Image: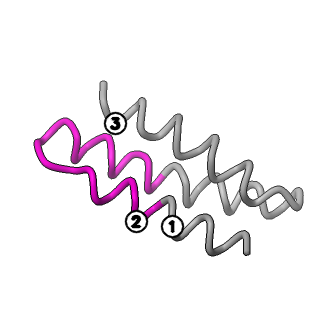
Amino acid sequence: MNRFILVAATILLSSCATAHQERSATQGAVIGGAAGAIIGAQSDQIVEGAIIGGVLGGLAGAI
């Protein structure tokens, strides 16, 4: 279930990319989400880590 949510969030975020800034934000969100999931897996909080990583990565990519 957790992996399904992560994959669904990744697909939804990546489908929003149209221009350069949005593409950078999407790439940041995907990379951040993956990193957050990996880090969160070590503390048994994969989904929370992926969400936080995705949000922070998206913000960093948009700047």
Location of the N terminus (image quadrant): bottom right
Secondary structure that dominates the magenta span: helix
Image quadrant assignment for residue 21: top left
- Tell me which colouring the rendered structure shows: one colour
Please name the residue shown 74% across and 49% down the image. 48
Amino acid type assigned to the residue bearing label 3 in the image: Gly
Please name the residue shown 22% across and 47% down the image. 23
Q: Secondary structure at mark 1?
A: helix
Whether 44 is drawn above or below 13: the answer is: below
- Looking at this view, name the residue that lies furthest to the top: 63
User: Looking at the image, is mark 3 or mark 1 nearer the viewer?
Assistant: 1
Residue matched to label 1: 8
Contact between labelled residues 1 and 3, with CB atoms less than 8 Å apart:
no
Which region shows up in magenta?
10-31
Which mark, by number, is residue 61? Answer: 3
Residue 50 in the magenta stretch? The answer is no
- Looking at this view, name the residue that lies furthest to the right: 43
Amino acid type assigned to the residue bearing label 1 in the image: Ala
**Which sits earlier in the primary sequence, circle 2 or circle 3?**
2
Residue 17, image x, y percentages: 22, 50
Amino acid type assigned to the residue bearing label 2 in the image: Ile
Residue matched to label 2: 11
